[in-house]
Image: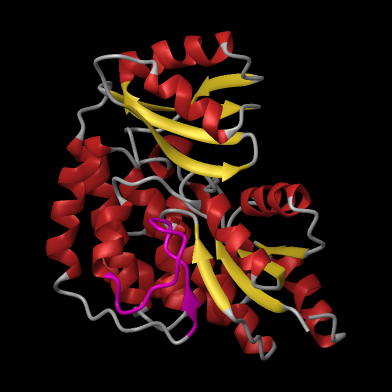
Amino acid sequence: MGKIALVFPGQGAQYVGMAKDIYEKNSKAKSIIDDACSVLDMDLKNIMFEGSDEELSKTENTQPAIVAHSIAVLEAIKEEVDLNYDACLGLSLGEYSALVAADAIDFKDAVSLVKKRGRYMQDTVPKGQGAMAAILGLDRSKVEDVIKSIDNGIVEVANYNSPGQIVISGEFDKIDEAIVRFKENGAKRAVKLNVSGPFHSSMLKEAGKKLSKELDKVNIMKPKVSVLSNVNADYYEDEGKDLLIKQVSSSVLWEDSIEKLLDEGYDTFIEIGPGKTLKAFIKKISSSKGANVNIYNVDGVESLNEFIQICRNGEI
């Protein structure tokens, strides 16, 4: 019998209307999202359900919205079926949802933390000084070679998402220069991302320092279920505050993390929260390794009902 991993999305997965149907139809999900609004002392659900795209895309709103959506879905699943899972991991921000799912951090603490994390990430580098870009169709070593060829400025790998999909981060002008360089070196696409800062680059070290003070105030326990860190693609051994500090300014080793789980016999991945981005990444990573896996995603009421039926049929 294979093993099951829960995976949680990060920033970029948000959309206006997120979690609205599950809030209206599921009392457990409703209470989670209401808890988030009350902890943050703001009408987060209004921003999620019918806010403007601009308001939802502010990093300090996006981050708690995604964690609230993910945990609302998880609790709605748990209310219906006895879901046993062997590991949790999340893409960047999603690591906080993973820690909640592994009973390492209380949901209310997580929502409060990611709101501050979002603000620190947003404010550390003034708008227009940093940028990110997705590079498609080049392997990792080629991407790293091109980065090395760029002089006098910051360009770093932010995310190793899947084979042929890598995100870079750094100084605004240098990212523009890198995009030209990547196209010259055969990238299928090199496109700037609509984000407010150079996330997962050394330019955000100051945000990590500020976050560290907030992490000190929160009780983070040893996970009850294995949690993989983005920073080293390895398991948390203790409460892992250092990993969460480093994570803000380090590369996200998503591809490496999924490969590790595949090597350890994981064959079922359940994406919980908004969107289907991780499902696409995992499909690509598993097929590049010739691994046969089942990947599900649960976002709203329809996918929740389908997933519950799959569980009750004994397919998971």
Segment colored magenta: 225-240
x and y percentages locating residue 311 in the rendered image? 79, 82
Q: Of 309 and 125, which appears nearest the observer?
A: 125
For the question of whether residue 249 can be seen, the reply is yes
Q: Of 105 and 30, which appears nearest the observer?
A: 105
Q: Quadrant of residue 218?
A: bottom left
Q: What secondary structure is the magenta-colored segment mainly?
A: loop
Residue at image position (62%, 53%) is 278
Magenta run includes residue 134: no
The image quadrant where one finds the N terminus is: bottom right
The image quadrant where one finds the C terminus is: bottom right
x and y percentages locating residue 167 in the rendered image? 49, 34
x and y percentages locating residue 308 in the rendered image? 76, 79
Residue at image position (75%, 63%) is 295
Residue at image position (68%, 87%) is 80
x and y percentages locating residue 134 in the rendered image? 53, 29
Q: In this view, does 137 lie to the left or right of 121?
A: right
Q: Is 287 placed above or below 262 here?
A: above
Q: In which quarter of the image is residue 21?
A: bottom right
Magenta run includes residue 237: yes
